[in-house]
Amino acid sequence: MVNGVVVVPAPRALKGLRLTDGSARWTLRTKGKPLHLTGDATRAYASLVDGTLLAVDARSGHRRWERALDHALFGGSLLRVDAFAVHVVTAKDAAGADAFRGERVSSFATTDGRPLDTTRLTRPCDPVQFSVVMLKGPRGTFLCRIASLEGEKPGFLLNSAADGPDTGSGNRLANVSLRSLTVSDGHVFARVGSQRPDDDFAEIDPELLGGPVWQLPLGMRCDPEDPAPVVTGQRAYVLCGARGAVVDLTRHTVASRFTLPPGATRAGGESWNLLVAGGLVFVLTQQGWVSVDPYAAPL
C-alpha cells in the first residue's frame, strides 16, 4: 500500500484501488496476465505470463520500467523485493522440464531494472515458496522450499546471494515441518506442522540453521496451498481456508480471530491473495476482493 492505494492484479492489467472504498484510482494495461506481484514503499513489481518483469509507480500507475526475463518459469516467475533489488526465480533452460522448477535467482535494481547478478541455487527450488531475508551486509539470502525430488525429504534451503554470475552456497534448514515462510525486517516467520490436528506459528532463526525461536498453536488446520502469513508491524495475519488469526509477535499470543464472509471462497494460493492495509485484511475470493476487520470479534 502506498498513500492509501493498494495494487492488485487483473486480467491483462494492474489496478490501483483506493483503500477507503475499493474504487479504482488507476488502471495500467499489460501485455500479458500478471501472475505474481510484490512491492516496496513506492513501486509495485509484477511478473507477466509472457516472461516480462514490470515496475509501476504504485501511487500514480505510471510504468517505470520493463525487462524481459531470460528463462522465465512456466506459469510465471515468483519475485521478492528487498531494499536494493527485485529477485526473480528463473529456470535453468527456457523449455522442457526445467521450465517448471526454479534453479536460479536473477536480481535486478529496483530503480531502473538493470541486471545485478544471478545466483545458482544448490538444489532446485519450488518457486511458490521463496523469500529473501537480509542477514548480514548488503546482500540478500534466499529461502526456498526444496523442489520435490525422488528420495529427498521436503524442506527449506538457505542459499546465500551470489558474488558473481552463477555462484552460490546453500545449507538446509533444520528438520522442522515448515509449511510456509514469511520474512519481515530480518526475521523469519512460518506456519509449522505439529502432532496435533492444528498447526503452529513460529519464528525461525535461519542464521543458526536451528529450530523455532518460539512457537504457539494457531488453533486451526492449514493446507499447503494456503497463503503465507502477512507480517506488518508487530502483528502477523494467518489465513487457513476461511478462518484467520492475528498473532501478536511481541507477546507470542493469538490476539484476535476472524472469518471470511459466508459464501466467500478463497481463490488460489498465491501470496498476494492475502493483503493487509489500514488494519483491514483483504482476500481475493472467487467472488472478487473482500475486506474483513480482523478485530471485529473479540476473543
Image (spheres, helix red, strand yellow):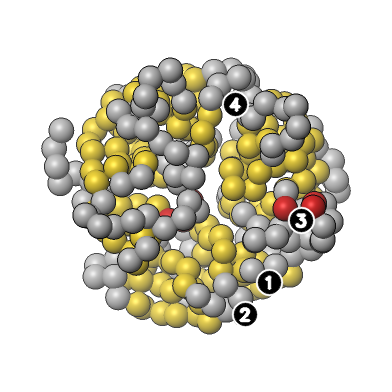
Front: mark 4 or 1: 1
Spatial CA span between label 4 and label 1: 34 Å
The quadrant holding residue 35 is bottom right
Q: Mark 3 or mark 4, which is nearer the start of the sequence? A: 3
**Would you name the residue on which mark 3 appears?**
99
Q: Secondary structure at mark 1?
A: loop
Where does residue 120 sit, x and y in percent of width and height?
80, 43
Choose mark 2 or mark 3, whichever is in front: 3
Q: Is 294 or 196 nearer to us in this picture?
A: 196
Question: Of the residues under marks 2 and 4, which one precedes in the sequence?
Answer: 2
Residue 181 in view (yes/no): yes
Cα gap from disc 2 to disc 4, whole angstroms: 38 Å
Amino acid at the residue labelled 2: Lys
**To which residue does mark 2 refer?**
31
CB atoms at circles 4 and 1 under 8 Å apart? no
- The disc, 2 or 3, on the residue closer to the chain's N-terminal end is 2
Compared to 67, does 208 lie above or below?
A: above
Give, as a three-letter code, the residue at label 3.
Ala
C-beta proximity under 8 Å, tags 4 and 3? no
Residue 267 placement, left or right of 30? left
